[in-house]
Amino acid sequence: MENDLGDEAPNTEEFRFQTVGEQLKAERERQGLSLTDVATRTRVPMRHLESIEKSQFSDLPGSTYTLGFTRSYARSLDMDAAKLGAELRAELSQSGHDSYHVPAQNYEPADPSRVPSKTLAWTAAAIAALLLAGYLVWRSMALDSSQAPTPVVAATDAPQTESAAAPAASAAPIDASGTVLLTATDTVWIKVYDANKKRLFESEMKAGDSFTVPADADNPMIVTGRPQAINVTIGGKAVAPLGAADRTIADVGVSASSLIARKPEAAASIAPAPQPATIPATNTP
């Protein structure tokens, strides 16, 4: 009878309560994973995983970190992290570790499972460096522009202008019998004709080309779209420009007497004239 009762006695080891660490270890081994595999998945140090499996809570950095590491461990095995977390709280309370905190300097300052990867950290650092460099460049440019010295006009500019104009005022008068020479300083089309619209010259001139206005022409006149590209001289002496830059002129006299009679400021006040196409074409004699 005693042997029969002894055979029927319950196996207390079979019904022993499993700790959270033992449950995690059993599931890890069932899945054929090593602690290194779990550490790689969770980024929790392997020594902490070993302490969790052995319920060595005094080797862990406090109850808060212990709970965080355990939940990360459970999630890596697709276990119920909330359920195991609640069971672990009970274990910590029973063992007197529910409010245990190890000095922070001896352990990681944060849950490694939530620490960004190295790639993300380096990327963020590179972006921050670029933003800082851009700000420094902008700031240096702003300071340079705000501190740029204001140009100082020399007090001698006005006297020099007056002295430069003096020789022109005292220059000898131009001889009305001198030869009128039209010289191109750039590519320009011109047409010279007389009072009867008879064409004396028409061509596209290149820089350096010239045309001598016939002295016996009847009131020779010119039409061109670029008067600034024509240098006019009488007997080798320059006269005022024929007109404003890039403004078409027409019926402007180019005889010596007509050019001498023009006031120096007349060139700037010449109104735009019709385009050359509006002037009646005539046959070359």
Image: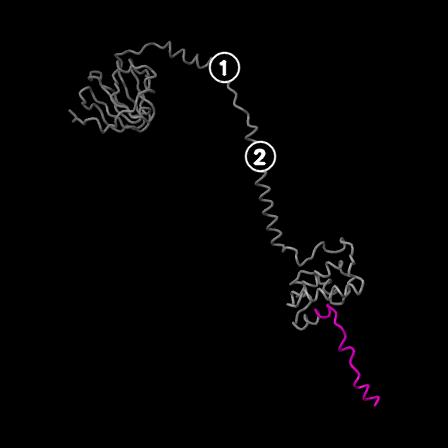
Between 174 and 130, the residue placed more toward the observer is 130
Write the start and end of the magenta stretch as one range: 1-24
Q: Residue at x 77, y 61 (%)?
A: 98
Q: Which quarter of the figure has residue 216?
A: top left
Give residue 157's position: percent from left, percent from top. Answer: 48, 16
User: For the view shown, which residue lies furthest in the bottom direction?
Assistant: 1
254 w.r.t. 60: above or below = above
Name the residue type under label 1. Thr
Between 8 and 154, the residue placed more toward the observer is 8
Find disc 2 in the rendering and name its residue.
140
- Look at discs 1 and 2 and give the one toward the viewer: 2
Q: Is residue 46 magenta?
A: no
225 w.r.t. 176: above or below = below
Secondary structure, mark 1, is loop
Between 112 and 137, the residue placed more toward the observer is 112
Give residue 36's position: percent from left, percent from top. Answer: 68, 65
Q: Residue at x 76, y 55 (%)?
A: 106
Residue 247 horizontal side relative to residue 136, left or right: left
Find disc 1 in the rendering and name its residue.
156
